[in-house]
Amino acid sequence: MFRQVLSTHWKWAQLELGVYSVIAFVIPTAFMKAMAVPSGANESTILSAMQGSVGVGIVIGALAFIAATTLSVRPWITDHARGHAFALSLPIAWPTFVRLRFMAGATLLLVPAVAVWLGGSLASLALTYPETLHAYPVSIALRFLSGSLVFYSAIFAVQYIAGKRAPVIVAGTLAAILVLELFGQGITGTSPVLAVWNAVTSWPGPFEVLTVRWMLIDV
Amino acid sequence: MNEAIVTRNLTYRAGKEFSIRDLAMSVPSGSVYGFLGPNGSGKTTAIRLILGMLPANDGTVTVLGHAVPSGVHAALAKIGYVPERLHLYPTLTVDETMRYTASFYPDWDAARAEELRRQFALRAEQRVERLSKGEAGKLMMLLALAHQPELLVLDEPTDGLDPVVRRDVLNALLEYVAAGQATVLISSHLVHEQERICDHVGIMDDGRLVAEMPMQAFRGGIKRLRVMQAPRELTAAPFTMLTRGLQTGREEVWVVRGWQTDMTQWFASVGSEVREVIDLDLEESFVELLRSARTTSVEARN
């Protein structure tokens, strides 16, 4: 059952996943080559190289978001266009079906994550960098996987819980945040939204993985 | 178990309007039950409620002995469903669709599915989105039949199909029914098609089941009568009056349900006379039933 659900998920997203995987594989090498550190380089050159590594992290982070969006939105749109009639007519509980769909998408996130790991490994092997710096291809691949899973879970949950009301709920939430921010600033002079953001993006917040520096080369 | 489907007081509201009101239907096991009604009468909504695809506001549904919605998944494993519109994934091929569906049914008969695919002349590698309407209808019928269901629920399965495809689909259905003890619920607004294959009928109108009876009673029991000196009141009439209209002078035209030949005696007993008993074809009977139900409904509202 899971194999067939995975197979349909793959069929719907294989083209995009292929493109993302190629990008994930190529980007680390391209960036690091552009920021290559000559042997015996001074401290400022090394810092500049590390800035390049931050650039790789930003691109990989954006890619994690795009891959997660693709894998959550494509199957949902296909099912939703037919009122989920195929899924609902199958002899399987709706929560079980949703779980299978979730697991299939989460499994496929491994494809670009492996590409990030291979690309990062290749880049770190192909480059020379000072002894004070180290390459972290496994770490950045795991961060890609964690980040994309967080995005994927959030988008997937909104879709399957809110259904076709998702745009209204998202717009309503954004409006509520804006009102909360305006009131908070006006009454206390502090930003409640910033406080919430700090809480969710720092350990043990669920989005901590998105705000740490995604460095391929670091000290 | 004598009834494959039983609903009681089934009610569903879409917004403020009633879509289905107090639906009480009984589909006998082993029957081919024609679910008739004009477009928009609530047949598809009723089917979705029966299959647990919509949550009812009130009432109960039992399918193959399983309460819906709590036991619907056990029931769905024994049901073949062909919806009104194509519900399959457009980018999958016929073969992929068959494999995908098969993975959910423990009783899927792969050999039978392949046999049906050949019989219906469906190409395994053809994508669902490229199938003609007739081919799509055949594929949905294949998927409904290949897991050897005890109950087939077919929502307008031949609507929009050309006569050749319609014949293929209905033949496959009749072959399956003849071979086993399957119950079939088939909705349609094509009355004559139902006459050929059904042994029970239920008639929907405006979200209500206005009549439910064996096909024999539907076919032979509704008559148009020319009545002379018709009595004003129907006391102890042995039939059900559907409509009553003045023709000329003292002659009235009645349409009655549950007619039998010996009922002419009743007219003699009330001082009137039946001049003529006219057979109605199925479509006329269907129209008269709907007309009667609508008149009753308007009177009840007023």
Image (tube, helix red, strand yellow):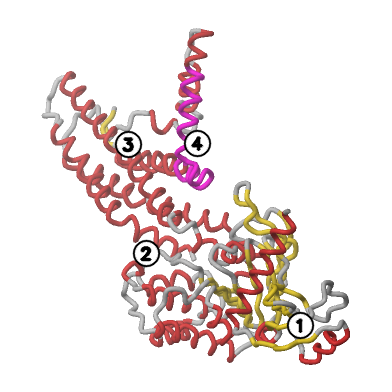
Residue B90 has which mark?
2
**Labels 2 and 4 in the same subunit:** no
Q: Which residue is mark 4?
A: A169
> Rounded to the nearest whole Å, what is the CA distance between mark 2 and mark 1?
62 Å
Element carrying mark 4: helix
Horizontal and vertical percent position of residue B47: 60, 66
Q: Disc 3 residue type?
A: Gly
Tag 3, which secondary structure?
A: helix
Which numbered marker is on residue A61? Answer: 3
State whether residue A10 is above or below residue A134: below
Same chain for mark 4 and mark 1? The answer is no
Disc 4/disc 1 C-alpha distance (Å): 68 Å
Q: CA distance from mark 2 to mark 4?
A: 29 Å
Residue in the picture at 44% in, 64% down: A3
Q: Position of residue B210 (x, y in %)?
A: 69, 69
Question: In x, y percent, where is residue A119?
Answer: 24, 45
In the image, is residue B177 above or below residue B252?
Answer: below
- Badge number at residue B146: none
Checking the image for residue B228, the label placed there is 1
